[in-house]
Image (cartoon, rainbow, N blue to C red):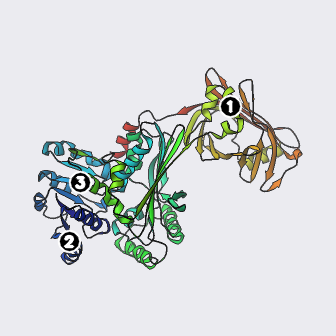
Amino acid sequence: MKVLVLGGSGVFGSRLAQLLVRDQHEVTIAGRQKGALDAYAAELGCAAQQMDRTGDLSALGDYDVVVDAAGPFHAYEGDPYRVARAAIECGVHYLDLSDDAAFCAGITSLEAEAKSAGVCVLSGMSTVPALSSAAVRSLAGSQSINALDIAILPGNQSPRGLSVMASILSQAGCPMRIFRAGRWEYDMGWSDPKHYMLPGQEVRQGFKINVPDTLLFPAHFKAQTVVFRAGLELAVMRYGLWVFAMLRRFLPIPITPGLLRMFKGAADLLAPFGSGAGGMVVEVTAKEQRHWWRLRADAGDGPYIPAIAIRTLLRSTTLPIGAQPALEIITLDAAEAAMSDLQVSFERESVDLKPIFAEVLGEAFSELPISVQSSHCTPYMSRWQGRASVERGKSLWSRLLAAVFGFPGEAADVSIEVTKTISSDHEVWQRKFGKHIFRSTLRATPKGMTERFGPFTFLLGLEVKNGSLFYPVKSARLGPVSLPKWLLPISNAREFEAQGRFHFDVELRAPLTGRLLVHYKGELSEVSSSDTDRVVKRSVS
């Protein structure tokens, strides 16, 4: 095929051109600076053409496929789809490497024009969402998906394109929408770090950012939670960016060309450190299993990965007609085959999920009513809502302890929302009574279930009796120091089913006095996303 690559002298565009030349396509790289283009073209063994995406695009008709690898796509002003529209008018297929969620989703506005012209128009033919969606489908198969957790973790010695840097910096510290436990919520760009394992047992850290996956995957895969993170190999860089993100939460710092050059200069100074190894992790959580696909690129081959989806597609005999985001356009097997000439390794892993309450209770767990069992079978994250009443102790000692543990204030009838976030050996429960929030962490240990409130950790003697689950306190410690039994609170807490619904009744009495500390009770039902398609469409408009 005759392929024109706009931005063909950039980090990703030049590597795409190189791969397409290897596959014996007739490649031309295009850009604004003729000198740089000619030098790259001579090195790559392809042609060069001076072209500005904002200028005359009539020459697109000389090609079979045009690829926009320029970006940054979030900064395209006026008519952001000018190149795509011009390609359609010329009867040419259009592909791009967009990592911008709104740009990628909005490409469907060209659907009628693309179909009428009989051309393929795909946005996001890059690591996200093209490669990531292929990995999700390969891992999940026909299983229902509860959660998706995806990360891209480049090596520090990989070259840095200004477009990618501008995209990440523009998000740092700014609100972004994420789909979590069946509901759209706001989070902050470059926040909430998490560690990921790459092939070779190397651990890298990623921070949340917004990409097409976070916007499109909830509806496409019917997932209850979708999270995406990106990383920087050097701690000084990723935490430096985190500090910048924190500053932008309170100060409206614009991402100017001068600021971008300053960050690029700082990154270039640190380029000799770290490694040229990068990777990608796709984690799929289904109801009873968790699956991983991991990629590791060595010898500086990481920047080739964003080009693999287009290379894979152009190896096929037909292209899909119409305009759409690049969701499940390629298969993971075909993508892995397209990386066979790169220094890239892959691994897959699957584990069965066993809820920590089922692990601690053993066979007794099956004696609980279905509604109670279901409340303790969250694969990744779940949200529960209902109504509750709260009674607080009146003594000074009880009020002091209630304040220390963050218990809610007294209320005859108040809304309650419980969000459970699950890891391999623990669960974090966030309880929200009205506007008041308090959290605890439950963990399965060899001695039984523990629950931690700040520095206090309690060992619970979980017990199933008459279809109810009881939570008596057996021991406690403050940090590493064990507390004597006379300092233990008295817990009369249970979960049970009434009229087919989950109920809770938690009464805690203060140590020493035995007087009421707090008593809250009510009912909860799980919240699910029944109409993610409508929510996604509204968020794009």
Query: Looking at the picture, does residue 314 appear above or below residue 202?
Result: above
At x 17% / y 70%, what residue is drawn?
Answer: 48
Instruction: Please indicate whether residue 522 sits to the left or right of residue 298 in the image.
Output: right
Q: CA distance from mark 3 to mark 2?
A: 19 Å
> Label 1 sits on what residue type?
Phe
Q: Is residue 358 left or right of residue 239?
A: right
Left or right, 462 with reference to 225? right
Q: Work out which quarter of the rendered image holds the C terminus and state it.
A: top left
Secondary element under disc 3, as helix, strand or loop, is helix
Farthest-out residue, top:
499
User: From where the camera sits, is residue 25 visible?
Assistant: yes
- Counting the numbered discs, the total is 3
**Which residue in the structure is indicated by mark 1?**
365
Where is residue 197? Give x, y as percent: 53, 58
Tell me the mark number nearer the camera, choosing from 2 and 1: 2
Residue neighbourhood size for the residue with mark 2, other residues' Cα within 10 Å, grouped as few (<14), some (14–19), many (≥20) = some
The residue that mark 3 highlights is 314
Name the amino acid, label 2.
Answer: Gly
How far apart in space, not on screen, are marks 2 and 1 (Cα)?
66 Å
Mark 2, residue position: 45
Q: What residue is at 15 percent from the left and 51 percent from the top?
A: 88
Residue 16 in percent (x, y) is at 28, 63
| Disc sitting over residue 316 in the figure | none
